[in-house]
Image (cartoon, helix red, strand yellow):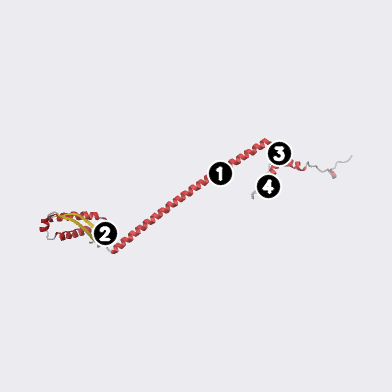
């Protein structure tokens, strides 16, 4: 058969029919078997000739229905009733078959690439979501740790302040504790400037007097000495 797009196809057809009037099948037609075969071939050419290859391959049920109606109407006067027509196979030329196979293979490859890309996309989305959740948890953990450290430092300051308040230390003791703290303050590389309150310098004088005793001034000499009487 030749399709509408001028491609030669081979079609294998099966026709199921029944002789309902033996007299008409004997006297109205010389050879009803050959007549049914020829009529099927002619009708099939007319039907397939109006379709392109793709339509012929995808419209088998439509072709079967058209063939059965035409054959049953034409063979009724011969005492024959066509009950069913089936297209067993439609084979396009080998070159067309190769092209169709390549097209189907390309389509399968395209779908495989799409599925792979979709899988990669979903994997990246899940990975990014996991990293985001991990970052959120780390940030929450750091925030809680900072809060706990701040609370601990606040409690330590309150404890020290309470102990100082209860002990009521004098300025000399505070100055001594400050002297003990100075080496720790100097451990940092950026600690090049120390700020010493004026109140603390007065206390340091007291500490010095406590360690080294009261400072005695030298008697005046020279012209500053008082005249003897």
Q: Which residue is mark 3?
A: 171
Q: Which mark is residue 145?
A: 1
Q: Is residue 128 visible?
A: yes
- The tag earlier along the polypeptide, 3 or 4, is 3
Alpha carbon distance from label 2 to label 3: 108 Å
**In contact (CB < 8 Å): disc 1 and disc 3:** no
Alpha carbon distance from label 4 to label 1: 29 Å
Tell me the SS state at disc 3. helix
- Residue mark closest to the camera, 1 vs 3: 1
Left or right: 27 in relation to 13: left
Alpha carbon distance from label 2 to label 1: 74 Å
Q: Which residue is mark 4?
A: 183
4 to 213, vertically: above or below: below
- The tag earlier along the polypeptide, 2 or 1, is 2
Q: Which residue is mark 2?
A: 53
**In contact (CB < 8 Å): disc 4 and disc 1:** no
**In contact (CB < 8 Å): disc 2 and disc 1:** no
Alpha carbon distance from label 1 to label 3: 36 Å
Query: Residue 193's x, y, as percent?
Result: 66, 47
Query: Residue 182's x, y, as percent?
Result: 68, 46
Left or right: 185 in relation to 18: right
Tell me the SS state at disc 4. helix
């Amino acid at each position: 058969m030749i399709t509408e797009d001028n491609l030669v196809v081979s079609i294998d057809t099966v026709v199921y029919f029944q002789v309902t009037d033996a007299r008409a099948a004997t006297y109205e037609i010389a050879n009803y078997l050959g007549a049914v075969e020829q009529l099927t071939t002619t009708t099939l050419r007319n039907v397939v000739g109006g379709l392109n290859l793709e339509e012929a391959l995808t419209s088998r049920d439509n072709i079967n229905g058209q063939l059965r109606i035409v054959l049953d109407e034409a063979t009724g006067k011969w005492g024959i009733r066509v009950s069913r027509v089936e297209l067993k196979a439609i084979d396009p030329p080998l070159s067309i078959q190769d092209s169709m196979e390549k097209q189907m293979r390309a389509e399968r490859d395209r779908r495989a690439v799409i599925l792979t890309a979709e899988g990669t996309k979903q994997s990246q989305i899940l990975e990014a979501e996991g990293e985001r959740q991990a970052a959120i948890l780390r940030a929450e953990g750091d925030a809680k740790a900072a809060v706990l450290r701040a609370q601990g430092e606040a409690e330590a300051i309150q404890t020290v302040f309470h102990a100082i308040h209860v002990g009521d230390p004098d300025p000399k003791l505070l100055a001594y504790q400050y002297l003990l703290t100075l080496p720790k303050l100097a451990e940092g590389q950026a600690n090049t400037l120390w700020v010493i309150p004026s109140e603390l310098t007065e206390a340091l004088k007291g500490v010095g007097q406590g360690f080294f005793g009261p400072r005695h001034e030298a008697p005046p000499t020279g012209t500053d000495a008082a005249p003897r009487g």
